[in-house]
Image (cartoon, rainbow, N blue to C red):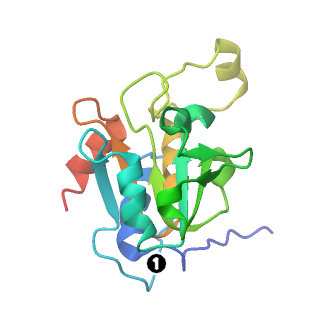
């Protein structure tokens, strides 16, 4: 006598963000269908940032003027390493020390570790077309594919992770990519949601 109850109201995300995130995840025909609703509205909550034009540190300085809690997310634990230097450091819990943003708490986590968390603003790194980019293109061993029941929808698990990353924000989310090497997820968002 079990009953399926769906939590469809969200208080964290804007309707505009969940329309995009929900549409993105629901492309998998095997995904459980939900119609998400929010009373919060933010015009254009998803921003695509090309790192060769606006680097991460410059973006953080801008964001720290507006928000106190900034979450930087990576598909991989090592996605933050290219940005670390003498003035931009990270401790073992992922908290970032950056003198130009002392008024904001900045933390880096992998998307897996961010499940259940939220922040004023989210920045997602490494949305590039590469083996270790996002989506990650490392292939499972054949034995894993035989053990795990998969939908056989391209990048199905990566799509779920991207949905998690997009929905950690209470306001806006910035997607960092490269102009001539964008992730297929960036290309899909630009194609489906030109606004």
- Whether residue 110 appears in this view of the structure is no
* x, y percent for residue 31: 52, 50
* x, y percent for residue 42: 34, 77
Residue visible at 33% across and 35% down? 184
Instruction: Please indicate whether residue 72 sits to the left or right of residue 60 in the image.
Output: right
Position of residue 114 relative to residue 157, above or below, is below
Residue at mark 1: 37
Mark 1, residues whose alpha carbon is within 10 Å: few (<14), some, or many (≥20)? Answer: some
Which of these two is toward me, 85 or 48? 85
* x, y percent for residue 183: 34, 35
Q: Residue furthest bottom?
A: 39
Quarter-of-image position of residue 140? top right
Residue visible at 28% across and 29% down? 181
Instruction: Please indicate whether residue 184 sits to the left or right of residue 138 in the image.
Output: left
The quadrant in which the C terminus is found is: bottom left
Instruction: Please indicate whether residue 77 sits to the left or right of residue 22 in the image.
Output: right
- Which structural element holds mark 1? loop
Which of these two is toward me, 116 or 5? 116
Quarter-of-image position of residue 133? top left
* x, y percent for residue 108: 59, 49
The quadrant in which the N terminus is found is: bottom right
């Amino acid at each position: 006598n079990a009953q399926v109850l769906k939590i469809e109201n969200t208080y964290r995300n804007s309707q505009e963000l969940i329309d995009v995130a929900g549409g993105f995840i629901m492309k998998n025909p095997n995904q459980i269908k939900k119609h998400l609703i929010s009373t919060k509205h933010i015009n254009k909550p998803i921003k695509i940032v090309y790192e060769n034009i606006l680097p991460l540190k410059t973006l953080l300085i801008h964001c720290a003027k507006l928000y106190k809690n900034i979450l930087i997310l990576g598909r991989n634990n090592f996605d933050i390493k290219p940005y670390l230097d003498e003035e931009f450091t990270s401790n073992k819990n992922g908290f970032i020390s950056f003198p130009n943003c002392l008024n904001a708490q900045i933390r880096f986590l992998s998307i897996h570790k961010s499940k259940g968390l939220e922040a004023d603003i989210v920045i997602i790194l490494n949305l590039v077309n590469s083996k270790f980019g996002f989506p990650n293109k490392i292939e499972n061993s054949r034995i894993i594919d035989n053990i795990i029941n998969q939908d056989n929808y391209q990048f199905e698990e990566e799509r779920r992770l991207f949905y998690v990353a997009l929905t950690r924000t209470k306001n806006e989310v910035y997607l960092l990519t490269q102009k001539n090497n964008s992730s297929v997820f960036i290309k899909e968002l630009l194609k489906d949601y030109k606004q």
